[in-house]
Image: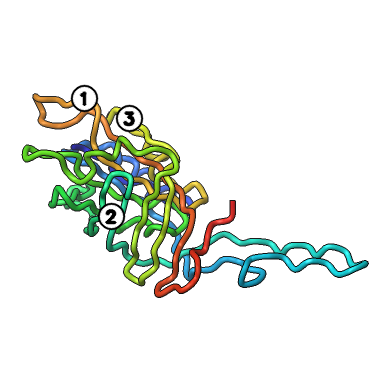
Amino acid sequence: MTPPAHAGRGRPRPGRWWTLTAVLLVVGTCCLAAGLTAHRDGLAVATTSPTGDTPAAGPGQPAPTPPPVTALVVARSTPVSLSIPAIGVTVPLSSLGLNPDGTVQVPTDYQEPGWFRLGPTPGQVGSSVILGHVDSYQGPAVFFQLRSLQPGDQVDVLLSDGVDVQFAVDTVATYLKSQFPAQEVYGSHGVSALQLVTCGGQFDGATGGYLSNVVVYTSLVAATPAAATTSPVRVPS
């Protein structure tokens, strides 16, 4: 399979952006992915009380104004495992970088997806990307059923600091590799997103690869702190 490479994240960096965009157009034999973003520290969300309720007004008193709720922020931490219950996937994650020619590395293990380490980690603002193989000559690989995910399906990523980051599937799309929307997949859109990328579509027997990429778009919905004894901190809707 052949993945497209990465695009810039966070604040624009014109010179570097065009260089990375050029890399995105490179076609290899597996799925490429990436992203660059500004780092965010801490896991925090505004709260009003242990239950999250706003105190009721007393007799003759105006109703209190609920305090503003801030966006969930997850610290940068290497993802170590991925779980997608709907398709029975619970696997460790490898870490991917760049090849000497500037293309993105692909997983060496067909049953283990990889996170592109030059992009944001899952839960940070921006688009984190995990890529995996759809199959091999030996049969189905780790992302063989990725295309069957439905909106609302859960995707969990465990980070090395013990935080469990939870995403929900927004949509699943298939693109010809020649028309891969790099900015849509890898660009930062001001939210915490996770994109899962594999190959799909028609198989080309002449080249031994697929002509398209399957992309699962997900959004952050909650994060459970390490050794948490309370409910997950959820992203305000």
Amino acid type for the residue under numbered disc 2: Trp
**Residue at position x 21%, y 25% in the image:** 202
Per the image, the residue denoted by label 1 is 202
Position of residue 195 in the picture relative to residue 191 (left or right): left
Q: Secondary structure at mark 1?
A: strand
Which mark is in front, 1 or 3? Answer: 1
Of labels 3 and 2, earlier in sequence is 2
Per the image, the residue denoted by label 2 is 115
Of labels 1 and 2, earlier in sequence is 2
Could you say where residue 71 lies in the image, as x and y percent from the top left? 57, 59
Compare residues 19 and 193 and report the one nearer the observer.
193
Position of residue 230 in the picture relative to residue 92 (left or right): right
Could you say where residue 11 lies in the image, as x and y percent from the top left? 49, 53
Residue furthest out toward the front: 59
Colour scheme used in the picture?
Answer: rainbow
- Tag 1 near tag 3, CB within 8 Å: no
Compare residues 222 and 229 and report the one nearer the observer.
229
Position of residue 48 in the picture relative to residue 11 (left or right): right
Amino acid type for the residue under numbered disc 1: Gln
Of labels 1 and 3, earlier in sequence is 3
Q: Which mark is residue 175?
A: 3
Amino acid type for the residue under numbered disc 3: Tyr
**Residue at position x 39%, y 57% in the image:** 122
Query: Residues under labels 1 and 3: Cα distance?
Result: 11 Å
Q: Secondary structure at mark 2?
A: strand
Could you say where residue 97 lies in the image, as x and y percent from the top left? 23, 56
| Label 3 crowd bin: few (<14), some (14–19), many (20+), radius 10 Å | some
**Residue at position x 43%, y 39% in the image:** 151
